[in-house]
Image (spheres, grey):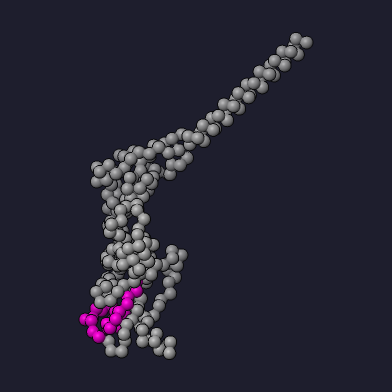
Amino acid sequence: MRSRGLVVVLALLLAAGATAAVFLYVRGVREEARTGGELVRVIVPTQDIPAGTQLDPLIQQGAFRELEIPRDAVVVGAVTDLSQLRGQTATSAILAGEQIPTQRLSSGALPGGALGLTEGYQAVTVSLSAEQIVGPALQRGAHVTVYASFSGVDTRALKGGAVPAPTQVRGIPGLVMPLVHEVRVLDVLRPGVAEGEQAADQGALVTLELLPVDAEKVVFAQQNGRLWLGLIAPEDVGAVEVIRPVDFLQLAKRTQ
């Protein structure tokens, strides 16, 4: 009888111990869920950093801060100490508050300079209004088709790359033509819009990556007509249909 009571007491003690263990485990899980688990300190920028930016001047300006995040949220190769940024250059754009993987840093000169120009190409900047650049949708890294509209200007030589002196064309009131297909946008600068702000419906300085022969066409069209940019969907890059030039006299004949 006594041994039987001892067994009951022992069973109660084991049950109480198991209950306590479960309680402590559940409380630990809840606490971990509430706090996010173990925190790790990483370095993040306080402003957007364009590709090709040297980081030493930004370090001196205090453009980086420490941020504690759950260990599970740390990206592979994230910078955890400011010393890892010294002497480095951003190889791609880094957003404010974003973790900085070391794979996006380089200690040497970037191929193509700060804009990442492809060998054999030139960077040309044009000033365009909102309707000419698809409004606020145009961003760095996009691909566009460059169109030109002319009124009373001989544009036939543009097809061969030569730049003629403007002459009047009798009988053709105007013409719209594609100048260059699939042009990479190197930069979009909207004056008055601070870093991180939503771009308003306004014009911008757009820097395009062009072959020298295409740069001549774009500069000529900018000086003697108007430029328009057609935004290409990412999935359509490499599959854009070539469009023939259209003059307004042809359009008038089609509608008759």
Q: Residue at x 36, y 55 (%)?
A: 198
Q: Residue at x 59, y 27 (%)?
A: 23
Q: Quadrant of residue 119?
A: bottom left
Most foreground residue, 4 or 130: 130
Q: Is residue 209 visible?
A: no
Q: Residue furthest front?
A: 201
Specify whether 54 is left or right of 100: left
Residue 87, given in percent of the width and then of the height, sits at 27, 45
Specify whether 62 is left or right of 20: left
Q: Residue furthest right?
A: 1
Q: Quadrant of residue 127?
A: bottom left
Residue 249, given in percent of the width and then of the height, sits at 36, 87
Q: Indicate yes or no whether the magenta region holds residue 154.
A: yes
Residue range corresponding to the magenta coloring: 146-168
Residue 244, given in percent of the width and then of the height, sits at 39, 80
Most foreground residue, 47 or 164: 47
Residue 133, given in percent of the width and then of the height, sits at 35, 67
Q: Is residue 162 visible?
A: yes
Q: Indicate yes or no whether the magenta region holds residue 121.
A: no
Most foreground residue, 30 or 112: 30
Q: Residue at x 48, y 36 (%)?
A: 36
Q: Quadrant of residue 158?
A: bottom left
